[in-house]
Image (cartoon, rainbow, N blue to C red):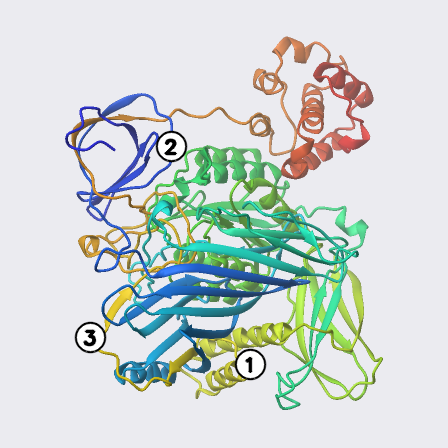
């Protein structure tokens, strides 16, 4: 970026400009440098090289310095992060050690804000100051706050860790009275379940970002203040290692981050270790995908109770975790439902204009969403109903209510999808959901809701509660786009809506994951689900998990249960899951040993406690205003007993060993736990979410610098120092990328499943009209010939992405079979010769 004395103007282009509530927000791209953001007269700068063309002129830019520094402009006090992960089958224990140092000349109270998985159970928190070790206790939240304040006022060191009231995946850590020059090592431990991905991989994600939480207009409180610094200025380091234990062989561990080679610890390959390679940059989440052989085998883990706990209590009794994979009859799975109301809810907030992957600036999130909607609309079955909603600060819908799927309605929808852009401002997801649920359901058309968002909202619990309240009338499938998408929001929507959650990060393609969820939605609905237990007479069971309400082929269900009583040494238990599928009763059984497994710690107990705590918290919210506090008291008792965090408790640690009062007034610093390049503060109604690429680093929270405190925004705003530009600056506009050949072909398919013999099809196949028309057998219908050619091209050239077009190809094959056309074999042979393929007729499904 040139200074005022520079004689060389910078080439860059304006990507987007928007006026919201009287404030103009502009986003500029600078080749070789960065993205610049302007609101009012303030410019902010970040760095990603781009290309440019077609220029116009911009005048007068001014850069304000805004870094994450202490009052003396020294680096933030976080020095290093060490993360150790232990995975046992489907659950993980994560231990993070964070080292802080107070470089002020006065005592420091530091506040760190950081993300955890939404279903994590925080179960240990301790601090080491010098040689003094302090271990925190779980206490009722108000009591913990009082103890914290009392400790500070009496000159003692204190630490307070608590969950956000608005979202279960945000924790804040208050480090009180850290003396000048003193270091503190903080150890945080949590346990969490691992989600199963479309390819059967277990996903663990160490969030690299706490995205600014968008606050809906009129909402109060709950906002977490978040800021950031460029990766080049981050003064702390991250080390990460993982140990994996499984009852089945570990086939591989993958990550978008560079890993050292996987090291097996035994010949059975059921134990392994892996580490993050040196030199990891803070530009993405640390995501591991763990693959087991025979991943769909049901399993059971029985964990012994805590020796010091009283028998009959949750922590004193054994707890079993069942991992169930119901298998559906092949005859049922081969059929696809031809009914349903499909409602697609698309995020069009400004950040959806960001690249899907920062290393590839061409494909934006909104562009990928448009392509995905094309595949979805082409794959829907005839006879269903559909509608498309989009949201930002406001929301829109293509049709006033869901319409029957036909050629006319499909084409009308696609024309509007083509014009969708990331131009609706903020992230107001609650209101469109309310509108969708206010629409009456269509008889015999089960409602299926697909939610796409890259954002995070401050009212996560309110959104999830709304989905839960309407879970009896629909299934909800959710998609988190980009690193930093809230796991609490995405997983919560799917869990409470009886659907499936998917995360699309880095170089992931959105389309295969979305199409897998569409296959789930098209599966016959499973009803009348029941779980029965067969245990020895002396053993009773208390189920900790909520009832199973949905089952999909290939989807895991985890069930936790407390086992009370004494069982014989070699005793076995049996669990039977019964359900009705397409009118046929089915069941799956799992037999398991009641002997507790060795060396499991208390991971299963804590996750079981967390599951029960979440259910009770939900019950307490539903009964608020008409209850006497007994549910809340039960949550607090369970949280204290198990040592697991809840929304009503907090971890409090006080160092009472040093009776000397700390000298000097206490300084308060909202300083970053690690995360990269994010700026935000509480969101006023006048300025909604603006476009910006979310850059990440791990765990950060900080108050907005004073110079910008009156300008609040919900976009990533990386900062690189002070600059002043008085020169005229050339601004360039980007060129439109060429459409993908697969999408070009798919866009030509009709709603019925067929293709027309037209010049556009010939072009998509890479041929001239004459080359395509001449080989057609004379007795064959043009649409039949065109459809066979399209299917051959898909199977011959796009077999590597078959999961993206499989459903629309099935629809085309069904259409062909219904035509009872002559000479189909001859057509396939002629089509292969024309396109240079060797596709067998049987593989086309005709």
Q: Residue 518, position in %: x, y?
A: 62, 47
Pick the residue in front: 518 or 671: 671
Residue 131 visible within the image: yes
Quarter of the figure that contains the N terminus: top left
The answer to whether residue 210 is above or below residue 141 is: above
Residue at label 1? Answer: 642
Residue 665 marker:
3
Q: Nearer the viewer, mark 1 or mark 3?
A: 3
The answer to whether residue 194 is above or below residue 611 is: above
The answer to whether residue 692 is above or below residue 115 is: above
Q: Residue 727, position in %: x, y?
A: 16, 28
In the rendered structure, the answer to whether residue 22 lies left or right of residue 823 reads left
Residue 49 marker:
2
Which element is circle 2 on?
loop
Which element is circle 1 on?
helix
Q: Earlier in the sequence, mark 2 or mark 1?
A: 2
Report how far apart the C-alphas of labels 2 and 3 lie in the structure.
46 Å
Q: Residues within 10 Å of mark 3 (few under 14, many from 20)?
A: few
Report how far apart the C-alphas of labels 1 and 3 lie in the structure.
38 Å
Q: Residue 468, position in %: x, y?
A: 52, 66
């Amino acid at each position: 970026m040139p200074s005022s004395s520079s004689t060389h103007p910078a080439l860059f282009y304006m990507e987007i400009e928007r006026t919201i509530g009287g404030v103009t927000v502009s986003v500029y791209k600078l080749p070789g440098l960065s993205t610049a953001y302007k609101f009012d007269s303030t410019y902010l700068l970040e760095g990603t090289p781009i290309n440019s063309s077609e220029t116009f002129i911009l005048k007068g830019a001014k850069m304000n310095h805004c870094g994450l520094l202490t009052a003396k402009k020294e680096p933030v006090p976080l020095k290093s992060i060490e993360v150790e992960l232990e995975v046992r089958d489907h659950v993980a224990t994560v231990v993070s050690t964070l080292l802080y140092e107070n470089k002020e000349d006065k005592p420091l109270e530091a506040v760190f804000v950081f993300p955890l998985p939404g279903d994590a159970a925080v179960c240990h928190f301790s601090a080491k100051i010098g040689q003094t070790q302090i271990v925190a206790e779980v206490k009722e939240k108000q009591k913990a706050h009082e103890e914290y304040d009392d400790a500070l006022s009496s000159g003692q060191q204190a630490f307070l860790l608590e969950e956000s009231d608005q979202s279960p995946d945000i924790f804040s850590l208050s480090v009180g009275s850290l003396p000048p020059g003193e270091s503190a090592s903080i150890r945080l431990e949590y346990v969490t379940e691992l989600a199963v991905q479309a390819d059967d991989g277990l996903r663990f994600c160490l969030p690299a970002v706490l995205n600014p939480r968008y606050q809906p207009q009129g909402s109060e409180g709950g906002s977490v203040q978040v800021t950031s610094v460029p990766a080049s200025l981050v003064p702390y380091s991250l080390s990460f290692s993982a140990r994996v234990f499984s009852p089945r062989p570990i086939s591989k561990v993958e990550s978008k981050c560079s890993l050292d080679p996987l090291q097996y610890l035994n010949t059975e390959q059921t134990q392994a270790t892996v580490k993050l390679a040196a030199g990891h940059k803070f530009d993405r989440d640390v995501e591991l995908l763990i693959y087991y052989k025979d991943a769909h085998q049901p399993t059971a883990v029985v964990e012994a109770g805590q020796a010091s706990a009283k028998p009959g209590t949750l922590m004193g009794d054994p707890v079993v975790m069942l991992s169930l994979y119901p298998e559906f009859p092949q005859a049922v799975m081969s059929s696809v439902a031809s009914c349903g109301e499909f409602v697609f809810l698309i995020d069009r907030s400004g950040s959806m204009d960001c690249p899907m992957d920062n290393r590839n600036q061409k494909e934006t999130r909104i562009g990928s969403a448009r392509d995905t909607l094309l595949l979805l609309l082409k794959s829907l079955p005839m006879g269903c109903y559909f509608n498309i909603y989009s949201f930002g600060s406001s929301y829109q819908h293509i049709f006033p209510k869901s319409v029957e799927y036909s050629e006319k309605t499909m084409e009308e929808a696609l024309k509007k999808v083509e014009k969708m852009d990331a131009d609706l401002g903020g992230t107001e997801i609650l209101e469109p959901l309310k509108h969708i649920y206010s629409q009456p359901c269509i008889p015999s058309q089960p409602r299926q809701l697909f939610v796409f968002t890259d954002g995070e909202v401050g009212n996560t619990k309110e959104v999830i509660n709304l989905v839960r309240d309407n879970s009896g009338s629909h299934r909800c499938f959710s998609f988190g786009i980009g690193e930093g998408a809230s796991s609490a929001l995405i997983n919560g929507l799917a869990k409470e809506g009886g659907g499936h959650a998917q995360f699309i990060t880095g170089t992931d393609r959105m389309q295969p994951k979305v199409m897998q969820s569409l296959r789930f939605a098209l599966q016959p609905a499973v009803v009348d689900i029941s779980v029965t237990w067969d245990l020895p007479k002396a053993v009773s069971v208390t189920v900790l998990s909520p009832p199973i309400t949905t089952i999909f082929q290939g989807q895991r269900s985890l069930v936790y249960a407390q086992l009370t009583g004494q069982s014989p040494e070699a005793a076995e238990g049996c669990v039977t899951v019964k359900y009705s599928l397409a009118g046929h009763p089915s069941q799956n059984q799992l037999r398991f040993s009641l002997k507790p497994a060795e060396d499991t710690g208390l991971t299963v107990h804590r996750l079981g406690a967390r599951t029960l705590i979440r259910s009770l918290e939900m019950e307490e919210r539903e009964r608020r205003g008409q209850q006497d506090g007994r549910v809340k008291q039960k949550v607090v008792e369970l949280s204290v007993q198990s040592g697991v965090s809840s929304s009503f408790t907090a971890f409090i640690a006080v160092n009472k060993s040093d009776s000397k009062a700390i000298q000097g007034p206490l300084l308060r610093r909202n300083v970053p736990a690690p995360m990269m390049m994010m700026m935000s503060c509480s969101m006023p109604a006048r300025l909604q979410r603006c476009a910006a690429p979310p850059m990440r680093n791990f765990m950060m929270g900080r108050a907005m610098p004073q110079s910008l405190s009156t300008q609040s925004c919900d976009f990533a705003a990386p900062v690189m120092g002070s600059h002043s530009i008085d020169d005229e600056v050339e601004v360039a506009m980007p060129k439109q990328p060429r459409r993908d050949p697969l999408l070009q072909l798919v866009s030509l398919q009709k709603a019925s499943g067929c293709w027309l013999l037209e010049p556009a099809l010939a072009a998509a196949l890479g041929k001239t009209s004459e080359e395509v028309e001449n080989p057609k057998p004379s007795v064959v219908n043009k649409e039949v010939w065109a459809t066979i050619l399209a299917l051959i091209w898909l199977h011959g050239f796009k077999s590597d992405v078959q999961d993206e077009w499989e459903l629309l190809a099935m629809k085309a094959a069904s259409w062909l079979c219904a035509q009872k056309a002559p000479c189909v074999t001859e057509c396939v042979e002629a089509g292969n010769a024309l396109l240079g393929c060797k596709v067998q007729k049987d593989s086309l499904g005709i």
